[in-house]
Image (cartoon, coloured by chain):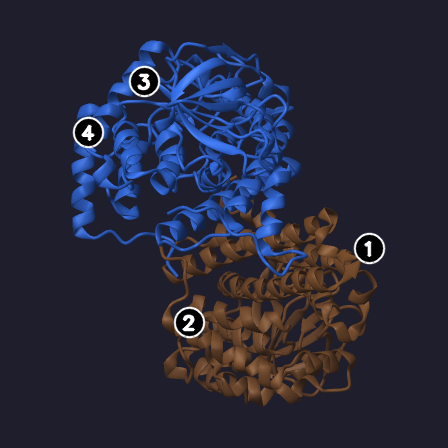
Chain colours: A brown, B blue
Amino acid sequence: MDLLLNEQQRMLQSTIQDLLRRDFTKETLVSIDAGTVDVEQGWPALASTGLLGSLVPEEHGGVGGSFSDAGVLFEELGRGPVPGAHFSSGVFASLVLRGCGSDEQQAAHLPAIASGDEVSAVAVTEPEYGWERGDVQLVAERTSNGYTLSGVKLHVPDATQATHLLVAARTSGENVGLFIVPVDAPGVACRTLRGLSTGLGEVRLDRVAVGEDALLGGASDSWDAFERAMLEATAVLSAYQVGGLESVFQMCLEYSRTRRQFQQPIGRFQRVQDHIIDIVNHLDAARWTTYEALWKLDTGRPAESGVHMAAALASEGYYLACNAAHDVHAGVGIVREYGLTLHTRMSRTLYHHLGSPRYHRRRLAGALGL
Amino acid sequence: MDFELEWTPEQDAFRKEARAWIEANAPNIPDHPDPANLTREEYELQREFGRRLGAKGWLYPTMPAEYGGGGLSMELAMALEEELDRYNMPLPPYYDTGGKLGGVAILVWGTEEQKAHFLPMILRGEIRTWQLLTEPESGSDLASVRTTAIRDGDEYVVNGTKIFVGSSHGAEYSWMIVVTDPDAPRHENLGWLMMPMDLPGITVEQMDLLFVGGERGAASGIKNTVYFDNVRVPAFNLVGGEGNGWKVAGTHLEIEHGLLRSAVRDDPLTERVFDYARNAKRGSRPLLDDQDVRDRLVDFYIDAEVTRLLHFRNYAWRGQGRQLTYEGAQAYLYQKRGQLSKARAVLDVMGPQALVEAPDDWAVAGGHVEVHQRGAIVDQHPGGTAEIQRVIIARRLGIGREVREEPGRLR
């Protein structure tokens, strides 16, 4: 019942803090956001820390760390927020491969994901957006020696950075299988969507032919295993949002002391204080539910309700904290180089990723036996 | 990071000992959703049990053994609380502000003679104490109290009025902040007194309020107005010295602002509300078919869970001796606001049936639900309003200020 990081986790934390200080300064992150620096430029530095293999088993070249360890790493990345495929590939795709892939498929891809040589993006959602089984409508048509995939996947994170896609598709009726598809396969086209979201893309599959060995686990339906991997990934994503919340809180605290209006620091005004107190409450609600959810996953306890609760609070909290931070900062907050909008964009981008707060709340009701 | 204690064999042995002892000694007192219904006889049974706990040092298990506490670790205290919880009893098993609030102030600020005199009778359960802070003109601005205690030889002469005091069934002692020097500057004009409640000139009068709650069996049930008319109290009873009353108060206020909750259990209301929802129907269809109802129940659950986790964090960290700053007020704020939003969620889900008082066939969960509807409103104000908690959080975080406010002394 210590509620503290252990020695090893403090080391992981300082590794990522060093990385942020060296390779992902606020100036760099602002330049990536402005499009003057390519997000992929930071990939070798990210890969060199070993964090992409945090959840990959040791026999496949990873660290085989706990979910709480991954939470520590991604909380620090969220502080930036450092964009890129570290979560999509290192966490989400790794867990999907672990949960759904055959031994051969895991051996073929996990080591390269852990080293950063291979970047996998998980392509599940479609124009009729959602994270339930029934939301997957793209069809995999059986051929003599495999499948043909046709359709559109939408709001896929980091698709243009990926070397491989893990595509969810209907194999028959309600059955949903997952296919591993190299992005250079004929008929695959990826582009990043422009707008307030960051890193989300469109993937068009035009009669993409894949072999039988592309089907994860050789299973015509792996949705249940996929949902379990998604649940695990969600807890790590919440930790990333907690890091973002922490940064937003620190920015506001600092600004409340240094910005003066009416001859005093603006933080002396209780209306300004209330915004910042709301932020720290969102932060701590998200933080402690997330830590408890990660602990439940690590110790084999039933974790569904804990993960869904943490995800709802982290997504809503990050979103609302950014709103409050804009109230605190007014005009300064929307200046790109100040850095707050990095979080604002990220909070919107992640709001629906791996399920909206509404999805998680409804899942929570189910997990509670309601 | 671990969210659960790993019990050692020694700790398990202690738990077994505690369980057997409690089974042999615990009184059987019926559950009163409204604690105002606690009878005198039941209260006497609680006190008798408290004295037996106190004789073992178990009434205030983490207080120093030399003064009558148990000198136990946080872990053993938790085991003890969990075992008492099986009998639906908290520690102490009745309303008493002596051992967790006033007693800590005496421990931090009292002279050796004062500690030796007051602490054993508090910690052994020989006396129960009330706290006398709020006055008709001093609520959130507590330092503006007007009750005077003017030195006259070896005594102080006390005059004034305190409100929202104590509980049903009286108290042997109270502790209070008073003005000892009406001419001194704010915060330097106060003293902190231990007041025997049987002195001539003290009148206790019950207030007529919407509801008064508290933690289960330790709920206060009612609140009183206490009048002091030329009450003469020995000067020995002033703790911390003249002019230091605000600092002494800083100790128990620090605890009251969100560090009082024990770590023991989830909010029992959650299961009561879920039970209702699982069995209720509307228009011959299960209530749980209504998506709005499901959403409101989840809102309810999340409010309860976050409150539990923030208190749990504070309990664990305080047990480790870590210095908390804004966390107590944060948990308290969340608890207060959570009560209101939970009450609304329950009203949405149950409709007006949530407002029916027991005993009545239509009362939900034996009346606990209706009591919560009232309690949620009443809980907003004691121990500092939600707004006061926000003020504390802001000062402790250092919003708009480089120098953060120091917490009250706990040792």
- Front in this rendered view, residue A47 or B21: B21
SS at circle 3:
loop
Task: Say whether marks 2 and 3 touch (CB < 8 Å).
Answer: no
Tell me how far mark 1 sits from mark 4, CA to CA: 60 Å
Labelled disc at residue A9: 2
Q: Tell which subunit mark 1 falls on.
A: A
Q: Is residue B64 visible?
A: yes
Instruction: Give the mark nearest the N terminus, 4 or 3.
Output: 3
Residue tagged by mark 1?
A: A262
Residue tagged by mark 3?
A: B29
Looking at the rendered image, the disc whose residue lies closer to the viewer, 2 or 1, is: 1
SS at circle 1:
loop
Q: Quadrant of the N terminus of chain B?
A: bottom left
Asked where in the image residue A170 lies, by quadrant, the reply is bottom right
- Front in this rendered view, residue A26 or A134: A26
Picture coordinates of residue A98 (x, y %)? 45, 73
SS at circle 2:
helix
SS at circle 4:
helix
Q: Is residue A163 visible?
A: no
Could you tell me the amino acid type at mark 1?
Phe
Tell me how far mark 2 sits from mark 3, CA to CA: 48 Å
Q: Tell which subunit mark 3 falls on.
A: B
Q: Tell which subunit mark 4 falls on.
A: B
Looking at the rendered image, the disc whose residue lies closer to the viewer, 4 or 2, is: 4
Labelled disc at residue B380: none
Looking at the rendered image, the disc whose residue lies closer to the viewer, 1 or 3, is: 1
